[in-house]
Image: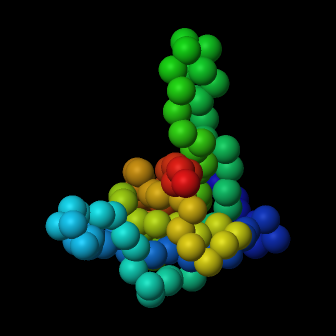
Amino acid sequence: MRFHERTRRTIAIAARQVRTDALGARVEDFSAARVQARANLYPAAGALARREAGLSDGQQMEAILPADVQIAPGDGVCIGSDAPNWRCVEVRRWPGHCAARLERIEG
């Protein structure tokens, strides 16, 4: 698979953290530290079949990243903003690259 630098976008990856709020509930949060990476972004495949069956998914996207990028399921991804607006739900790794499936964070 050939990836061209001209089609890549800069994204920021924030590690997942769990914090306790004032009432004692555990709340998902993301680290203030961001790791910059260049990725090719594509709409996720297979979403149309679920919509035809009447099932609704969150908006999903596929990010193709270099193999050395550290990303794990649960990490937040910032695309076009300073706060994480996407969450990594799956990572598949190959020798030359990795593919991360992202889901839009509601709210």
Question: How far across and how far down the image is residue 70, in percent?
Answer: 41, 74
Most foreground residue, 8 or 3: 8
Q: Is residue 70 at all visible to an observer of this figure?
A: no
Quadrant of the rendered structure where residue 46 is? top right
Question: How far across and how far down the image is residue 44, in percent?
Answer: 60, 41
Q: Residue furthest top?
A: 53
Most foreground residue, 82 or 6: 82
Question: Please, is residue 2 above or below residue 70 in the view?
Answer: above
Question: Please, is residue 52 above or below residue 75 in the view?
Answer: above
Question: How far across and how far down the image is residue 41, in percent?
Answer: 67, 57
Question: Please, is residue 43 above or below residue 25 in the view?
Answer: above
Question: How far across and how far down the image is residue 42, in percent?
Answer: 68, 50
Q: Residue furthest right?
A: 6
Q: Residue at x 65, y 67 (%)?
A: 79
Q: Residue at x 67, y 44 (%)?
A: 43
Colour basis: rainbow
Query: From the viewer's perspective, is 46 left or right of 14?
Result: right
The tally of labels here is: 0
Query: From the viewer's perspective, is 63 left or right of 27?
Result: right
Quadrant of the rendered structure where residue 65 is? bottom right
